[in-house]
Image: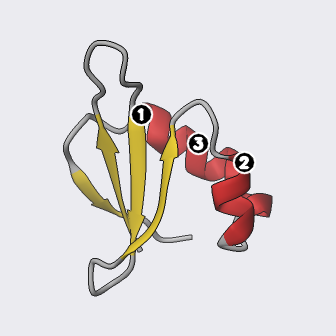
Amino acid sequence: MYIIKVKGIAKIPDYVQLRDEKFTLLAYFRVDRPDKSLDKLGLGDKQDQIMHIINNLPFGQVTKLEI
């Protein structure tokens, strides 16, 4: 799975994209509201670990997420 942090502009907030190995979009959620999206993917139990990675990730960088 890959993770991309997208910088929002003006009134648009920052977002995160989670993509699979073929780069198909799995989830797209606001940085401050990951709950429902991570639960739908079955990653709700790893939310703290994923959010730690997201908070330290620079904007626009594609990173392989191995959990």
Q: Is residue 10 above or below residue 41?
A: above
Q: Residue at x 72, y 73 (%)?
A: 42
Judging depth in this view, the residue of 36 and 48 nearest the camera is 36
Tell me, for residue 51, which label it has, or none. Answer: 3
For disc 1, the marked residue is 56
Q: For the N terminus, which image quadrant?
A: bottom left
Could you tell whether 23 is left or right of 53 in the image? left
| Whole-number angstrom distance, CA of label 1 to CA of label 2 | 18 Å
Q: Pinpoint residue 52: horizontal percent, then vertical percent.
A: 56, 39
Q: Residue at x 51, y 47 (%)?
A: 29
Q: Residue furthest left?
A: 60
Q: Is residue 13 above or below residue 18?
A: above
Q: Which of disc 3 and disc 2 is earlier in sequence?
A: 2
Question: How is the model colour-coded?
Answer: secondary structure
Could you tell whether 31 is left or right of 59 in the image? right
Tell me, for residue 6, which label it has, or none. Answer: none
